[in-house]
Amino acid sequence: MKLSKVFIAIVIAFLLQSCKTSKNPIITNVFTADPAPLVYNDTLYLYTSHDGATVEDTNYKMPDWHIFSTTDMINWKSYGVRLSPKTFSWATGDAYAAEAIHHNGKFYWFVSTFHKETERSKGGAAIGVAVSDNPTGPFKDAIGEALIYNEMTTDVKHGWDDIDPSIFVDDDGQAYLFWGNLSCRWVKLKDNLTELDGPINYIKPKNFIEGPWVYKRKGLYYLLYAGRGAQPEQVEYCTSKSITGPWEYRGIIAGNAENSFTTHPGVIDYKGKTYFFSHNGTLPTGGSYRRSICVDYMYYNEDGSIKKIKQTKKGVKQIN
């Protein structure tokens, strides 16, 4: 009888553990935004920006970038600050959205920040590249200058249009960089990921505001972004049979983030599931300048279209 009770207790404990779910937001010890997931060696790494604004502030204060990791989607290890604009001698100002990739044995962290007024640039938003031998760093400036700076793009006139880089390497090894605010741009990169390999191209996804995220699934290319939708910002997307387009608009997949007028998508496949990362402002004292990262499942229809995502407070289940 005692043995059976012990056995039942073990079974119950196992079931409770196996059914454990995350709670959104998933990062609660610091205000984070602009999630960029990366899977390497069976671990999911999450590269984020950091909201340092006070409750009274009425604009962004984003001093640096952080890294987190998980192997079960429930427990997140924080590595703290791993990069900042101070890493780049040419940079000044805030640490906007960034995305990392593993390529040719190294980790490249594409960041958006602002350029000092120099002989090369009069200032404005710019994109830099940091590199490391390890997913958590230390990272250093891979080029010694900005990869993209304001004077290189002239189709819109405001100074913060060159932000939110998304890096994608296709099956043939060709690398592409997408980015932009109120204008979506893309360019081929050389295999070292630190040099342009052709002209900058401009596309006009419907309702595009910012935050592109590019990936490929079953031969179909996906371009997700923060769009105007019914009311800014919501996550919308396009698909294409070619990474260079043309892109077909497919609609809104995630509505307005709670208590935040911005959103930012990040998509990754991990241990048999597809996860959709974004941010909202629901932590205590949170808001549009004090955001927090969340994760939910993402599912596809048979034709490759994405099913609508409803951000939940419950989050996702633990995986082994």
Image: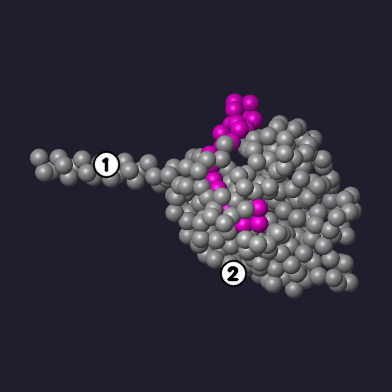
Is 204 on the left or on the right of 49, as rendered?
right
Mark 2, secondary structure of its residue: loop
**Residue at horizontal 63%, vertical 30%?**
304
Identify residue type, mark 2: Pro
Image coords of residue 68 (percent x, y): 53, 58
Task: State the extent of the magenta-drawn residues as a range.
Answer: 288-309
Identify the mark nearer the N-term, 2 or 1.
Answer: 1
Considering depth in this image, is 102 or 70 the residue closer to the camera? 70
Residue behind mark 1? 12
42 over 139 or under it: above or below: above
Residue 141 visible in image: no
Instruction: Answer yes or no: is residue 70 visible.
Output: yes
Residue 303: within the magenta? yes
Mark 2, residue position:
138
- Three-letter amino acid code of the residue under disc 1: Ile
- From what the image shows, is residue 4 above or below residue 27? above
- Residue 221 falls inside the magenta stretch: no
Tell me the residue at 75%/69% (across/down).
92
Q: Residue 316 location in percent, x, y?
A: 47, 42
* Residue 178 position within the rendered picture, expressed as x and y whole percent measured from the top left: 75, 49
Q: Position of residue 28 (x, y in %)?
A: 51, 56
Q: Foreground residue, 46 or 309?
A: 309
